[in-house]
Amino acid sequence: MHDIPVKEKSLSSDEIIAKHNEYLFPSVFNYYKKPLVIGRGEGTYVYDPEGNKYLDFFGGILTVSVGHCNPKVTQKINEQVTKLQHVSTLYPTENIALLAEKLAEITPGKLNKSFFTNSGTEADETALFFAMQYTGSQEVIALRHSYSGRSLFAMSLTGNSAWRHGGTHVAGIKHAVSPYCYRCPLGLKYPSCEIKCAQDIEEMILTTTSGSVAGFIAEPIQGVGGFITPPKEYFQVAVPIIKKYGGVFIADEVQTGFGRTGKRMFGIEHWEVEPDIITTAKGIANGVPLGATIARAEIADSFTGLTISTFGGNPVSMAAALATIQVIEEENLAQNAYEVGQYLREGLEELQKKYSSIGDVRGMGLMQACEFVKEGKEPDPQTVGKLFEEMKNEKVLIGKGGLYGNVVRISPPLTVSKSEVDDFLRAMDNSLSLC
């Protein structure tokens, strides 16, 4: 007679929080006064260990592209796990070759060679390293309000003090003014401003650098910065200036990539300029850790030294990415992001008319934000804090960002429906009435 295995009892939310507080670094912060423990997910919803159901309109920071535990993606992951789990980039595999080929096919312009890592941080570092190797310059232009990651180099690139710890670790990085129309740093108004924020890059290069730059790294929409969306002419003005002084243009698509901004696969395609390098992560594999740097061949070929990424070409991550991209294409989710995103935007603008605390609504596709303010555009993070707690009570999850912590970020999976948007808007209306 065989013993019947006894299933271990799952920990409760309180038990998990207690262990989190005891054993994790305190810098690993959580949302909410009492953190929300998530035990499982399905589609647009997540569940805590007690079985409470939440509508997820933040998607793991724009990472769950095609819904939690999408069965088509999960199937491919399971098949790969039983076949080959890991070998590192020292050995070619079918999946790494197929994903690199696919990225060369779907990225804009002449980007045709890829390097795979574990995260957006590493993807950005890789891009800047190759830009420096290719140009021979060590000076880089980034944007204020930007976010590039948590390594020393990435924090130096980041233009937000809340995420830039310990000072400036890497020299040669200059921060241009952000194309933040709602709070124009130059005190101008669009469109009469003539895009001075972009024009200023030339004087910045001439006055704060050696006059020769390695590159310009910019998010098509600034994610952690609070979904700051530049005017349509911004990159058309900025990128030629960078090229004039020898640099390459790096589009940081860690948050905007893979249909998130609607209609197109990559955010930079809306601005009709061709990047020399794209970095991406997050939504590429629906939550499986993966970063990618995709570059023009001459840039990729400029470095002939040896390098590896132990986990970057992991065959399971590659399988997840291939499956995720396939779902986005076959189900036309970039178009869904556009259509449902427009519906969401209209609903947010109606709420803006009703609540004066919403100073600005911005974004593209399923990457929408509300900036909360007091009189005279004074940032209002207090209302955002209250809104978070009320939305949690409504069983809806949202994100936040912005230099002042006063921006609500809204980014559901690309599979979201208009009826789920209706549920979200009702919850937000109810919550705002209590703030």
Image (cartoon, rainbow, N blue to C red):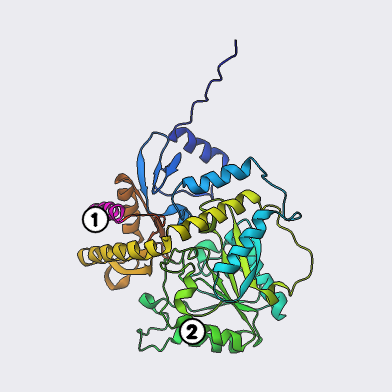
Q: Is residue 97 left or right of residue 327?
A: right
Tell me the residue that label 2 is attached to: 236
Tell me the residue that label 1 is attached to: 429
The amino acid marked with disc number 1 is Asp
- Between residues 305 and 21, which one lies in front from this camera angle? 305
Residue 246 in the image, given as x and y percentages of width and height: 65, 85
Residue 226 in the image, given as x and y percentages of width and height: 42, 66
Residue 183 in the image, given as x and y percentages of width and height: 38, 76
Residue 157, magenta (yes or no): no
**Quarter occupied by residue 195:** bottom left
Quadrant that contains the C terminus: bottom left
At a point 67% along the width and 54% down the height, the residue shown is: 94
Q: How many marks?
A: 2
Furthest residue to the left?
A: 354
Residue 253 in the image, given as x and y percentages of width and height: 52, 67
- Between residues 426 and 82, which one lies in front from this camera angle? 82
- Residue 173 sits above or below residue 18 on the image: below
Q: At numbered mark 2, what does the secondary structure look like: helix, strand or loop?
A: helix
- Label at residue 104: none
Which of pointers 1 and 2 lies earlier in the amino acid sequence? Answer: 2
The amino acid marked with disc number 2 is Gln
Q: Is residue 359 left or right of residue 252?
A: left
- Residue 100 sits above or below residue 423 on the image: below
Q: Is residue 272 left or right of residue 361?
A: right
**Quarter occupied by residue 405:** bottom left
Residue 166 seen from this side: no
Marks 1 and 2, how far apart at CA:
38 Å
Range shown magenta = 418-435
Task: Name the mark nearer the viewer: 1 or 2.
Answer: 2
Q: Are marks 1 and 2 in contact (CB under 8 Å)?
A: no
Q: Is residue 330 left or right of residue 388?
A: right
